[in-house]
Amino acid sequence: MSAINHQAKSFCSLAKSGRKSNYLSKLAWPLLLMSTTMSGTVQASSQDPYIAGFEVYAKENGSLTGSINAYVQDVNKTVRSVGYVGKEVSLPQPTKVMDGVYTVVGSLIWHNPSNFGLNNNLSWIEFEDGVFVFNAGPNPAVAHSFHQIIKRHTNKPVKWLAVENSQGHAYLGASYWYDVGVRNMYSHSQANSDFANGYQQIKASWARAVGQAITQDARDVSDKFTEFDDKLVINVGGGETVELLNFGPGHTPGSTLAYIPSRNLLFTGDVGYNKRSLAFFSYTNVGYWIDTFKAMKAAMPEDVVVVPGHGAPTDMATITRDTLGYMEYLTKEVQKKIDAGQKEEDMSSIDQSMYKDRPVFQQTHEHNTVHIYKELTGGDLGMSFE
């Protein structure tokens, strides 16, 4: 046991000092192998397999339980004190939207191990009193790496965080931001409730798609969020405010948009897309989304600068064409088929060729017509956790 204690102390010392890049290969895995050899295979779970191995070993070796549990608690405490222990992952270079405003434009394809789950946009705004972050990231690894990008641009601390909706790529990185000291965290009330209720399934889904290693440290910190329903105004110093807005359901039942009047700048979240094909999930209501988009557009200046949920920064005309235009066209065409007495299997004949060059078109276009058909006819949309 003395050898284990020595390795344990070495690990904690390395983690606390910031020398963390190879700790798993040098310390964790040899000890995990020892524990699994003695106690059997550790089952896959949302827990760090390294910690899981020690906990199994402690249960089967009663005389060592106290020492091992103390070590496990020390490791967990160390990880939480820094938010994430591991290498910085490679993210796209930030795009400058305007002075003091940047966005990292995520991949326009599905979340997968090659993009670390970053297939939406992560943004930050620099204010007099600190930095406002929009979207937490899909896991602690991406959140940490995004934070390092911010710190290379400004020495101002991150003080505020808002998430666009209940989906994993907006929310699963939130525990990182809480661990590094961000206490002003905001979400629409419905989105926060949906994330909390679906947390286990959402995390498991993203871990399968992106990788267990970078997802396992994510925790549900939805209880730390300040919720709002329609509008919340946040004073961010220097006479500036951030308006958190909700115009209704659509892509997700709850969503958060952020508008900064002093900069005529709007973060639409997934209410607005630029170029990428829209994706409809079981919880998406296209009819509501159309109404929500129109309400958002009516409330904003025509020349507002837009950072959409997917795609590069743009203007209102572009996201109106790419988002509202697509939904209105498809809804109209599906309704024509329904009025003619056609069925679900007939929806695939709808011409969407004008959208074929959009990313993920092949993976979404047929499903999208069926989704609208079921929505208009009261069909079962199923259940999904994203």
Image: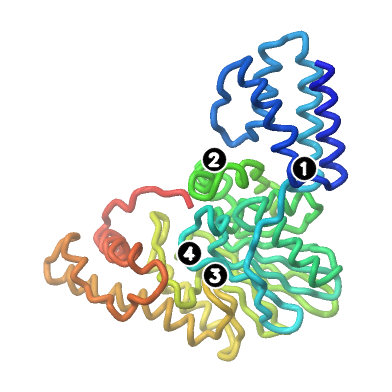
Q: Which residue is mark 3?
A: 309
Q: In front: 297, or 320?
A: 320
Q: Position of residue 134 (x, y in %)?
A: 66, 66
- Residue 249: which numbered mark, if any? 4
| Marks 4/1: CA–CA distance | 34 Å
Q: Quadrant of residue 26?
A: top right
- Please indicate whether residue 189 sits to the left or right of residue 361 in the image: right
Q: Is residue 153 shown to the viewer in this render? A: yes
- Residue 190 appearing in the image: no
State which quarter of the image contains the N terminus. top right
| Residue type for callout 4 | Pro
Q: Which residue is mark 2?
A: 200
- Mark seen at residue 80: 1
Going from N to C along the chain, the mark reached first, 4 or 1, is 1
Which mark is in front, 2 or 4?
2
Residue 188 picture location, percent across and down? 60, 60
Secondary structure under tag 1 reads helix
Residue 279, position in %: x, y? Answer: 41, 64
Dot 3: element = strand
In the image, what residue type sits under mark 3?
Gly
* Picture residue at 36% right of the left edge, 69% below the top: 361
Residue depicted at x 78% and y 29%: 73
